[in-house]
Amino acid sequence: ALALFPGRTEEILRLSLRDPDFRGLCEDLEVAQASFTRLALLPGPRERPEVTEYRTIIAELEDEIRAYVGSKLS
C-alpha cells in the first residue's frame, strides 16, 4: 500500500497498525503480488491465464485499498 501512496507513508503505517481490515487488504495485496511474480518467472508461455488473473486481482485490491484509504484518511 505504501507504493500506492508515496507521500502518505506515516498515515498509511498508522492506519495499518490500528485497522485490522486495512492490514488484511495490504496482506492480500502482498500475497497476490508475490504469487504474480513467481508465476511470471516460471518457464513456458509468458501469458499464462493465471498471470492475467493475478493482474486483475492486484488491480482490484489496489482499487479497494485506494477507496479504503480515501474513506479513512480524507
Image (cartoon, rainbow, N blue to C red):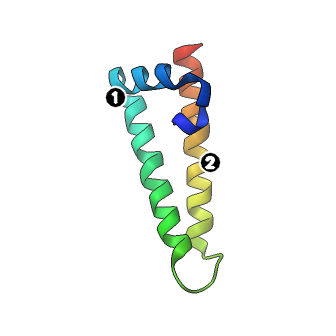
- In the picture, measured across the screen, residue 17 lies left or right of residue 49, that is left
Q: Secondary structure at mark 1?
A: helix
Q: Secondary structure at mark 2?
A: helix
> Relative to 19, is 30 above or below?
below
- In the picture, measured across the screen, residue 45 lies left or right of residue 17, that is right
Residue sitting at x 58%, y 41%? 62
Estimate the x, y position of residue 14 in percent, counting from the top left. 40, 20
Which of the 4 quarters of the picture holds residue 54?
A: bottom right
* Crowd rating for badge 1 (residues with CA inside 10 Å; few <14, some 14–19, many 20+): few
Estimate the x, y position of residue 9 in percent, counting from the top left. 51, 26
Number of numbered discs overlaid on the protein picture: 2
> Relative to 48, is 55 above or below?
above
> Relative to 11, is 32 above or below?
below
* Crowd rating for badge 2 (residues with CA inside 10 Å; few <14, some 14–19, many 20+): few
Judging by the rendered image, the residue that carries numbered circle 1 is 20
Residue closest to the far top: 74
Depth order, front residue of 33/20: 33
Judging by the rendered image, the residue that carries numbered circle 2 is 59
Residue sitting at x 34%, y 24%? 17
Which of the 4 quarters of the picture holds residue 50?
A: bottom right
